[in-house]
Amino acid sequence: MEGGDDIRPGETRTELPPDFDAGLYFIGTIRTPWRNRADCPKNPREAGDAVSTIELDPRYANALAGLEAYRHILVLYFMDRARRDLVIQVPRHSGVAQGTFALRSPARPNPIAVSVVELLGVEGTVLTVRGLDCLDGTPLLDLKPYRPAVDSPDR
Amino acid sequence: MEGGDDIRPGETRTELPPDFDAGLYFIGTIRTPWRNRADCPKNPREAGDAVSTIELDPRYANALAGLEAYRHILVLYFMDRARRDLVIQVPRHSGVAQGTFALRSPARPNPIAVSVVELLGVEGTVLTVRGLDCLDGTPLLDLKPYRPAVDSPDR
């Protein structure tokens, strides 16, 4: 769904480079209660107490060692249905035109989301978390411990 | 530098998939005071008050509109010199073996870093920020507004 003609009045696009500069591995799959975009909460606040699971590709199983010690983790995932060429966007909820980098919209040159979630449990290669708001089936890119000393701006 | 034989005792690697699943655009370049890995601070705390600049590719210039209203932003960048196949790592500073996902080490299947930085100014396509700790020349992947209500775990 890169490109296409479904842009709203006031939105503008850029010409993306002809080639990618680096590659990503999808390292797992996120399972949430939301099967289509219309049902998706607009942000983690709206997601409320919903519990999701993250199924990690078994080839990375050993890389989870020690993560269970953290109450909060960062989850990076790939919003693979978003177009990547919009530079000015008009979000439906605000109707105000803004630059892509001033928004958390999935549509951006590299559609990578960063979510802080509560880690409820780890069993084998399945993590149970609270706080994700993405579509069911979203590809996982990374897991990191959340460290208030560096991840909070008032450090 | 993917693969290679420079792993430490206690570290283990996995077999990465034969192909990438998606592609990244490098959308700009980060300019910091650190020209080689030995000089790099180990985290943003150590970087102290150092000021860095982010040079955005002009094709995305309009996407900055509105970002200047935020005091803190998230910067995503690609740690392109890191190997991607380690699942257990022994960080030099701790000497303790841990899973890759329990560490903030650059070495990970998708070497994407997330930093919260203070935005000092935007002039054309150049941003001045405080709080980055990466190598000079690091490729930029994304900029997002930092929103305490969703990015802080005590929301």
Image (cartoon, coloured by chain):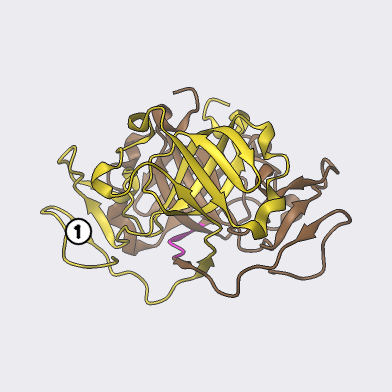
Chain colours: A brown, B yellow
The image quadrant that residue B79 belongs to is bottom left
Residue at point 32%, 61% (across, down):
B84
Vertical order, B64 against B8 (above or below):
above
Callout 1, which amino acid?
Thr
Q: Is residue A49 visible?
A: no
Vertical order, B42 against B20 (above or below):
above
Q: Quadrant of the N terminus of chain B?
A: bottom left
Residue B72 painted magenta: no
Stretch in magenta:
A25-29
B74 vs A143, left or right, is right
A73 vs A114, left or right, is left
B102 or A129, nearer to the observer: B102
Magenta segment main secondary structure:
loop
A22 vs A67, left or right, is right
Residue at point 86%, 53% (across, down):
A10
Residue at point 50%, 27% (across, down):
A153
Disc 1 chain ID: B
A148 or A40, nearer to the observer: A148
Residue A5 at x, y = what percent? 82, 69
Residue A28 painted magenta: yes
Residue B54 at x, y = what percent? 52, 46
Residue extending farthest to the right is: A9
Residue at point 54%, 38% (across, down):
B128
Q: Residues within 10 Å of mark 1 (few under 14, many from 20)?
A: some
Q: Which residue is mark 1?
A: B12
Residue extending farthest to the left is: B9
